[in-house]
């Protein structure tokens, strides 16, 4: 079982310093050619390799070791406390291992979790209680839970943003998805918060962490994940390769072009909210007929782009690179991570 054990791998950086690791130009050219080939293929392409061996390579499932990441979070919060910063913002991309790390950190610490109204309740005409921050250390583990992109669904979040502009009595930790954070940056004229995110993994980090079995493998994982270790781990586990393979090709699922405009709205809504039920998705996309949304969701699921579990639609780990690229082509990609 591969694990990320090097403490220096996990570093929190200011969001303004985030840069997507550069991908070798040969990888970019190959990705362009793969995309061209995909348009000619009716079926989803998963992965191919130059290896001519008959048997699939045996590779242990990769799992993250969270203690180093938890230690990095403790170090960040200690530094913030020394600098008298009361509220710390963490901005996390989809599928980042930091989401699970935050959950584990919350279990190990006694910080109070803020109560958030149920999303269904946000859509009623009932008044939403104003946010009051506790006098003891507190944490908001996922800001998107208090938000629906709907005329009624912004009230709690607006109250939260207003309240957190003022000095808090106790330390607070706000965890926000990257798609929501950049949406708020655009719609609220800049949040004016000092936010942190995990430093992306480059080729060296992918090798050191044992996510990649070779440098050739690391370059492929970097090309598809753009430095997101969670996405890299998903591709590593889904498509095992052996360390002696040199011509490795990892191909991402393709977003179907049928109902392209509806797919754009659906994918953006799912990433913005971190997942939605069918009911809430139809409420967010009021201008789209429910049957068209349902057809689009089923089509995206058949291509591996989204999944459905516990009454919640989400973009899959393997489908995220394709969804992000698809939205970027339509000027909907507002987040670098």
Image (cartoon, rainbow, N blue to C red):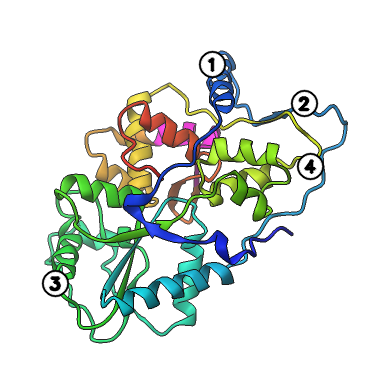
Q: Nearer the viewer, residue 251 or 67?
A: 67
Circle nearer the N terminus (1, 4): 1
- In this rendering, which labeled residue sits more in front, label 3 or label 1? 3
Please state the extent of the stretch shown in magenta in the rendering. Answer: 294-307
Circle nearer the N terminus (3, 2): 2
What's the distance in space between the residues labelled 2 and 4, CA to CA?
A: 13 Å
Q: Which residue is drawn at 76% across and 54% down?
A: 60
Q: Name the residue under label 4.
A: 243
Q: Which residue is drawn at 28% across and 86% down?
A: 136
Q: Is residue 259 shown above or below 128?
A: above
Tell whether position 301 is magenta: yes
Q: Name the residue under label 3.
A: 166
Q: How crowded is mark 4: few (under 14 residues within 10 Å), some or many (20 or more)?
A: some
Q: Mark 1 points at which residue?
A: 36
Q: Nearer the viewer, residue 151 or 82?
A: 82
- In this rendering, which labeled residue sits more in front, label 2 or label 1? 2
Residue 79 visible, this orientation: yes
For this view, does 268 lie left or right of residue 221? left
Q: Position of residue 264 (x, y in %)?
A: 35, 32
Q: Is residue 254 shown above or below 60?
A: above
What's the distance in space between the residues labelled 2 and 1, CA to CA?
A: 19 Å
Circle nearer the N terminus (4, 3): 3
Q: Which of 155 and 63 is in front in this view?
A: 63
Q: Residues within 10 Å of mark 3 (few under 14, many from 20)?
A: few
What's the distance in space between the residues labelled 1 and 4, CA to CA?
A: 28 Å
Q: Position of residue 201 (x, y in %)?
A: 54, 49
Q: Which of 274 and 311 is in front in this view?
A: 274
């Amino acid at each position: 079982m591969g694990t990320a054990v090097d403490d220096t791998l996990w570093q929190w950086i200011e969001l303004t310093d985030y840069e997507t690791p550069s991908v070798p130009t040969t990888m970019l050219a190959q990705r362009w050619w793969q995309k061209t080939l995909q348009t000619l293929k009716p079926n989803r392409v998963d992965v191919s390799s130059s290896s001519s061996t008959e048997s699939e390579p045996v590779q242990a499932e990769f799992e993250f070791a969270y203690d180093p990441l938890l230690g990095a979070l403790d170090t960040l919060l200690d530094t913030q406390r020394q600098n008298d910063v009361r509220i710390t913002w963490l901005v996390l991309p989809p599928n980042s291992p930091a989401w699970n790390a935050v959950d584990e950190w919350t279990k190990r610490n006694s910080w109070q979790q803020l109560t958030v109204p149920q999303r269904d309740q946000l859509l009623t005409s009932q008044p939403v209680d104003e946010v009051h921050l506790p006098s003891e250390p507190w944490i908001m583990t996922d800001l998107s839970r208090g938000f629906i992109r709907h005329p009624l669904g912004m009230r709690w979040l607006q109250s939260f943003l207003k309240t957190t502009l003022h000095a808090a009595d106790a330390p607070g930790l706000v965890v926000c998805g990257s798609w929501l954070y950049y949406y708020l940056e655009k719609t609220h004229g800049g949040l004016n918060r000092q936010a942190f995110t995990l430093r992306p993994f480059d080729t060296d980090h992918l090798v050191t962490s044992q996510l990649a079995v070779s440098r050739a493998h690391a370059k492929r994982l970097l090309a598809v994940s753009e430095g997101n270790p969670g996405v890299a781990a998903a591709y590593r586990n889904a498509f095992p390769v052996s360390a002696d393979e040199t011509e490795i090709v990892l191909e991402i699922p393709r977003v179907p072009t049928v109902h392209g405009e509806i797919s754009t709205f659906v994918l953006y809504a799912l990433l913005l909210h971190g997942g939605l039920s069918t009911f809430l998705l139809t409420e967010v996309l009021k201008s789209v007929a429910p049957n068209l949304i349902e057809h689009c969701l089923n089509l995206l699921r058949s291509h591996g782009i989204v999944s459905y579990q516990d009454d919640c639609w989400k973009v899959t780990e393997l489908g995220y690179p394709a969804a992000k690229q698809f939205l970027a082509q339509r000027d909907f990609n507002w987040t670098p991570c």
